[in-house]
Structures are given as structure tokens and as C-alpha cells.
Image (spheres, coloured by chain):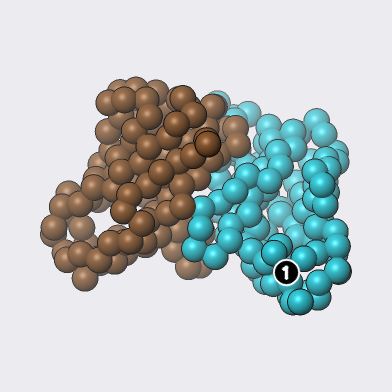
Chain colours: A brown, B cyan
Amino acid sequence: EAQVTQNPRYLITVTGKKLTVTCSQNMNHEYMSWYRQDPGLGLRQIYYSMNVEVTDKGDVPEGYKVSRKEKRNFPLILESPSPNQTSLYFCASSLSTLGPQHFGDGTRLSIL
Amino acid sequence: SQQGEEDPQALSIQEGENATMNCSYKTSINNLQWYRQNSGRGLVHLILIRSNEREKHSGRLRVTLDTSKKSSSLLITASRAADTASYFCATDPSATQGGSEKLVFGKGTKLTVNP
């Protein structure tokens, strides 16, 4: 089954404690991206990757890092999380940059 | 600023009625996409309409695109309780302007279908 898998689905942690949200897709998609969704602000892109070892900033990259060492994986790293990064995060993949996006089920992060 | 803006922000209807949601955008686009999001879940792609298309159907969904008015509408006919979700439009505002290619999502319309 074609899918984008994110882990963990839920995480409560404290300010400053490094965390990684994993994202994996099984569709051999070249394009992957991370979004955060906040009430009243909609979906905002954090980082995207057009292929292995090719990543670029989206609209709200501050406080986040990503890597793309393999085509299927695109982890999101919060080196020193802060409360303003409390949000619902989505990973997505697609065949092309502007094509239909396949989304994961989301990761709800709470930073205390 | 937001490229796509959905209207209304929220819509409540009875089962069996039709639901219409609108999306307006600011700049030229190559295509426009509609997505559905059930509460707390990931977005699911519904339909993509290209700038040279005026109407597209998929099951109970009908999407129209008016590039002269920079607007699109999503019509769900004979709605069901299971259609309760948020619906988002996504556009590619920079595709024709030489900028970085990416989709920009609106803030969504929250649809409630009452049994």
C-alpha cells in the first residue's frame, strides 16, 4: 500500500531537548516536504527536498533542520525545541514538485 | 500573504444537500488542487484541475476553474455525514513567474454534514 509514515504520532517533550520526527515513503517519490499546521494559519511549508542530498527552506524554516540521505526518508530535526514549535506536523511526498501530494497522518508535538 | 483563500470558513448542511466551497487566488497558476482533511488526519488529494480546464468531475465532486476571476469552486453533491472534513485548495503561484516551485495551501473550509 502506498503510504507516507511518520513517527511518532504524538510527542510531549520539554524545551531544549533535541528531537527527530521521522518520515518515510514507499512510492519512490523524489519530492518530499514538511509542513506545520496551526489554527488560523493553515498549512505552512518548513523545508522541502527535490531529491537525495537536495534540500531547501520553505516559508518557516527557523528552528528546524532536515536531511535527505536516502530517497525514501526525510527526517525533521528540532535541535533545541521551543514552545512556539508546538504544532501539528505533516510530511508529504509527490512525484513532482507541483503534483498531488501524499500526506502522512501527522505528528502532534507539544513542547513544554 | 496567502495565495489561496477558501470561502466560507465554515459550512454546515444536512445530509443529502449539496455543498459548495470556493477558492480565490491572486496570481497566475498552472494548476489548482483540492484536498480533504478529516479531523486530526493528513490531507488527502481529491482532484487537480489545470489552468486550461474549466471543469472536472470525480464521483460526487465537481470542480470548476475560472482563471479570469482567479477562482475555483468545489461542489460536493448529495453530501453524506462521512464528507464532514476540512477542504483546502492549493495553488502553484510562482510556477509561471520563474520563482521556486511549490504549492501554497489555503486555510480551508470546515464542512459539517449533519445526519
Q: Find residue A34 and report its horizontal and vertical position in percent.
A: 40, 44
Type of the residue with mark 1: Ala
Location of mark 1 (residue): B81
> Taking B11 as reference, is A22 above or below it?
above
Left or right: B77, with A5 as reference point:
right
Q: Residue at x 44, y 63 (%)?
A: A38
Image quadrant where one finds the C terminus of chain A: bottom left
Q: Chain of mark 1?
A: B
Q: Is label 1 in a helix, a strand or a loop? A: helix
Q: Find residue B111 and report its horizontal and vertical position in percent.
A: 69, 68
Work out whether residue B100 or residue B75 is closer to the camera in this orientation and state it: B75
Work out whether residue B33 or residue A40 is closer to the camera in this orientation and state it: B33
Q: How many numbered marks are there?
A: 1
Q: Residue at x 83, y 40 (%)?
A: B56
Which quarter of the picture shows residue B45?
Answer: top right
Asked whether residue B71 is in view, the answer is: yes
Q: Residue at x 71, y 54 (%)?
A: B23
Q: Find residue A39 and report its horizontal and vertical position in percent.
A: 48, 68
Left or right: B77, with A39 as reference point:
right
Q: Find residue A28 and report its horizontal and vertical position in percent.
A: 46, 25
Asked whether residue A57 is in view, the answer is: no
> Taking B35 as reference, is A16 above or below it?
below
Q: Residues within 10 Å of mark 1 (few under 14, many from 20)?
A: some
Q: Residue at x 38, y 29 (%)?
A: A72
